[in-house]
Image (spheres, rainbow, N blue to C red):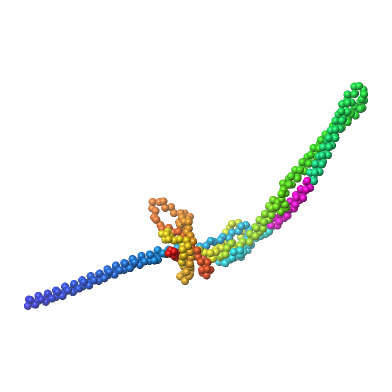
Amino acid sequence: MTTVTHVVEHDIITTTEVESADEETARKAKRKKGFTGLVAAVLLLGGGYYAYDYFVASRHAVTDNAYVGANVAQVTPLIGGPVREVLVDDTQKVKRGDILLRLDDTDAKLAVARAEAQLALTERKVRGLIATDSGLGAQIASRAADQARADAQLAAARGELDKARIDLQRREALVASGSVSGDELTTARNAHTTALANVKAAEAARSQASANRLTAVGDRDANKALIADTTVENNPEVLAARTALDQARIDLDRTIIRAPVDGIVSKRQVQVGQRVSSGQTLMVVVPVQAAYVDANFKEVQLAKVRPGQSVTLISDLYGDNVEYKGKVIGFSGGTGSAFAVVPAQNATGNWIKVVQRLPVRIALDPKQLAEHPLQVGLSMTADIDLSN
């Protein structure tokens, strides 16, 4: 009886141990399988990462920190004045040369009329100076003849004076001998006095004639200085008057303000009746047909970026339905933080390195812009192909 029991118990123990061993083996196999799967997953993920890095990330530089830009043209008057008419408004498309607004041109027209009158007066004056020049030459000849006559009269008067002096001296010498009467001596003295007066008068006349000739010469020289080597057309005074007229006409033309470029009118800040000054910004014209993209890439992304590389761009406006093709045309001269109003000062003890972003200028295809226009400031996603 005891032996049977022992055998039964032994059988029971043996069966239990076998079942436990099987379960342990199954668990080990399951753990091994799970570990193998984990390793395979890690290897797969690692391989996928390196494959992505090699085939995609290393051959593409991508950022969504990109925005549409354009060389916006400011509309500013070159002269001041009240606004008479505004012909455009925000969102309106314009072509280069289209009239945007007009200033009051009353003062400008008066300035043109004054300049035209001044030019006519100046031309008349110069013509008169040219005509006077020949007349002044004849006047000098006449004054020279007058001086020659005065010289001759002075010489004659001096001759008469010498004759009267000799006659007076001779008669004075004969008075003592009684050969000359007192009346004769008086007559001789009167003749000498008259001759002396005639000499002084002749000298005065000669001085006046000489002064008149010098005055005529001075007038001719002054006149020649105004017209020397010139005609009415190239005379400096006429040229100055003509320049003033040209300036007045330019100012009149500037009362009409035109679009400097093709584009869309934006930020209109002018109203009819408003008095504007030279250089004041009245509105801007955005040349959307010449828009570009500034993509702000991290500095660690730019090692392989070169001008001329192709770029694929997607705008938030149109989504994935529209894909733009572009080309890298250059890099900014500095990072965004370098050109900030208050640049960051990193020379401090608690400095923390921050990856900087450098703007990359990307040109867009004009045909695509014509089909799907982009406005300044819109967000873009840029993908530069680094494979070439």
User: Residue at (45%, 70%) from the top-left corner?
Assistant: 320
Q: Give residue 104's position: percent from left, percent from top.
A: 65, 60
Can residue 135 be found in the magenta stretch?
yes
Above or below: residue 381 compared with residue 154: below
Residue 166 within the magenta-colored segment of the rendering: no
Compared to residue 343, the image places residue 323 above or below, namely: below
Point out residue 231 in the picture as x, y percentages from the top left corner: 72, 52
The reply to whether residue 291 is visible in this rendering is: yes
Does residue 84 appear to the left or right of 332 in the view shown?
Answer: right
User: Which residue is more in the foreground, 365 or 86?
Assistant: 365
Residue positioned most to the top: 177
Left or right of 279? Residue 210 is right
State the residue lying farthest toward the front: 388
For the C terminus, which image quadrant?
bottom left
Instruction: Establish if 82 lies above or below 37.
Output: above
State whether the magenta stretch is mostly helix, strand or loop. helix
Residue 377 as seen in the image, left or right of residue 40? right
- Name the spot of residue 164 as percent of width and height, x first: 87, 30
In the rendered image, which quarter is residue 52 located in?
bottom left
Q: Which residues are magenta?
A: 111-137
Q: Residue at x 66, y 59 (%)?
A: 252
What quarter of the picture does the N terminus occupy?
bottom left
Residue 54, x across and y down, in percent: 38, 65
Q: Residue at horizontal 85%, vertical 33%?
A: 159
**Residue 100 seen in the figure:** no
Instruction: Please state the total of marks drawn on the protein image.
Output: 0
